[in-house]
Image (tube, rainbow, N blue to C red):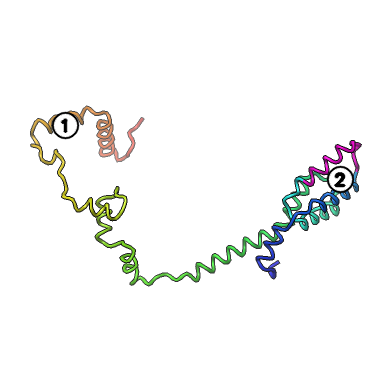
Amino acid sequence: MTAQSSSTIQAAIHGKPEPGNTLRRVNAVLGLYYDPDFDMETKALVREEFVRALAAYPDWAVQRAFDAWTKNQRRRPAPSEIVALVAVEMKPLTDELARRRVEEEEQRREQRVLPDPSRINDIMRLNGFTPKRMEAVRRAPMAGSFAEAEVATARPRVQHWTEQADPSGADIAQLAAARAANPLMQASRAARFHTATTGTEEPDL
């Protein structure tokens, strides 16, 4: 198996089914065992089930599966049992291809050349990841592009009204009262108080 090329193995796995050969083999194998007293139509339908179940598999694997059955069994097979033996015949091929894929991937990883650390900043800069742009993205995380982030951060920052209001004025007092009455704010403050006093994050139930 290891001496065969991957293309040869793949060709064997995807080999051409031969329904005619399958039917002839089914007739021969079923004839080796007790043959129920079915009418001719039922017997034909039974054989058709085998042909249908094995229609997707290469002829060589189907023939080997029937070989394995006649060597080891003393009764008539079911279609599913022959299909299972086909899988056994094909497994060495599929396993070998899987092994080669893993080996090839390992070789690619070993051969992969990482950039010199001294060039990483140059590569980042050539691809647009300059310190200025990264800072713009940090300050405008919802921007859809570098350009949008740069425009957003270039605009003068607009102060929130609470930053300009009189700390002891009516507006701030009204805001504080509304926050105190908000159930979410009450729950948050209770959780912070619990954490500060007990050292645990969740209040006892």
Q: Quadrant of residue 103?
A: bottom right
Secondary structure beneath disc 1? helix
What residue do we see at 91% from left, 42% from top?
A: 34
For label 2, the crowd category at 10 Å Cα-Cα, with few meaning under 14, some 14 to 19 and many 20 or more, is some
Counting from the top left corner in percent of width and height, residue 183 is at 27, 28
Disc sitting over residue 75 in the figure: 2
Residue 152 spot, x, y in % from top left: 23, 50
The quarter in which the C terminus is drawn is: top left
Report the magenta residues as a range: 34-51
Q: Closer to the N terminus: mark 1 or mark 2? A: 2
The magenta stretch spans residue 45: yes
In the rendered image, the quadrant that contains the N terminus is bottom right
Q: Is residue 66 left or right of residue 94?
A: right
- Residue at 16 percent across and 32 percent down: it is 176
Q: Is residue 18 left or right of residue 109?
A: right
Q: Is residue 54 magenta?
A: no
Q: Position of residue 24 (x, y in %)?
A: 86, 51
**Looking at the image, which residue is at 33% across and 65% down?**
124
Magenta residues, dominant SS class: helix
Name the residue that disc number 1 marks.
175
Amino acid type indicated by mark 2: Arg
Q: Residue at x 74, y 57 (%)?
A: 16
